[in-house]
């Protein structure tokens, strides 16, 4: 089972708190454990929303909003893509993630499973499931 772990922080505080050298070292060690365990497929940190933009589709119109997104309650600050045996395994790994209790920020790590071929088959969409499998194989991605 593939899952994405979303690292969320409070939107209004994202530019106010920089990670410490100790926190970066702890996160590096944690990432190394994920790699050694064979579950980490991808991951990365994202620049603050001030460096980004949002494209909004509403009522048939499209608009672009430049960052920062201080009105947002939560901003995605980073992510991982893991291959695990179950949602419970992913949650156990997330519980071990380093966190800085002195940062003053609220952090939320959300675990979301990917749709897989079997999910499409269960919905009676075998053709879509097969197409997904073929695209993943052509890209060299794991099942």
Image (cartoon, rainbow, N blue to C red):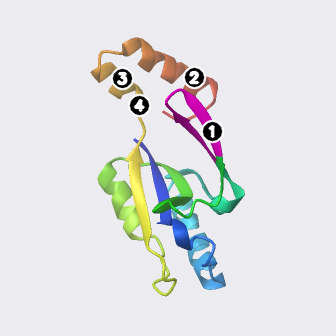
* SS under mark 3: helix
Label 1 environment density (alpha carbons within 10 Å; few <14, some 14–19, many ≥20): few
What residue did someone put label 3 on? 120
Mark 2 touches mark 3? (CB < 8 Å): no
* SS under mark 1: strand
Task: State whether residue 143 is above or below residue 127.
Answer: below
Residue 47 in sight from this viewpoint: no
Q: Earlier in the sequence, mark 1 or mark 4?
A: 1
Name the magenta segment's main secondary structure: strand
- Could you say which is closer to the camera, residue 128 or residue 31? 128
What residue did someone put label 2 on? 135
Residue 62 is a magenta residue: yes
Q: Which residues are magenta?
A: 54-64
Q: Earlier in the sequence, mark 2 or mark 1?
A: 1
- Residue at horizontal 49%, vertical 87%? 102
Distance, label 1 to label 4, CA atoms, is 32 Å
Res 63 label: 1
Q: Earlier in the sequence, mark 4 or mark 2?
A: 4
- Residue at horizontal 48%, vertical 55%? 6
What residue did someone put label 4 on? 116
- Residue at horizontal 35%, vertical 59%? 91
């Amino acid at each position: 089972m593939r899952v994405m772990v979303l690292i969320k922080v409070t939107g209004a505080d994202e530019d106010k708190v920089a990670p410490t050298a100790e926190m970066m070292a702890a996160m590096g060690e944690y990432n190394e454990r994920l790699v050694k365990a064979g579950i980490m497929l991808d991951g990365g940190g994202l620049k603050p929303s001030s460096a980004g933009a949002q494209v909004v589709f509403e009522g048939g119109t499209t608009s672009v909003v430049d960052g920062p997104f201080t009105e947002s309650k939560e901003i995605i600050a980073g992510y991982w893509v893991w291959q695990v045996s179950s949602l419970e395994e992913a949650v156990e790994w997330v519980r071990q993630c380093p966190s800085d209790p002195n940062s003053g920020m609220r952090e939320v790590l959300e675990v979301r499973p990917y749709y897989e071929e079997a999910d499409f088959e269960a919905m009676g969409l075998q053709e879509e499931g097969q197409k997904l499998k073929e695209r993943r194989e052509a890209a060299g991605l794991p099942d």
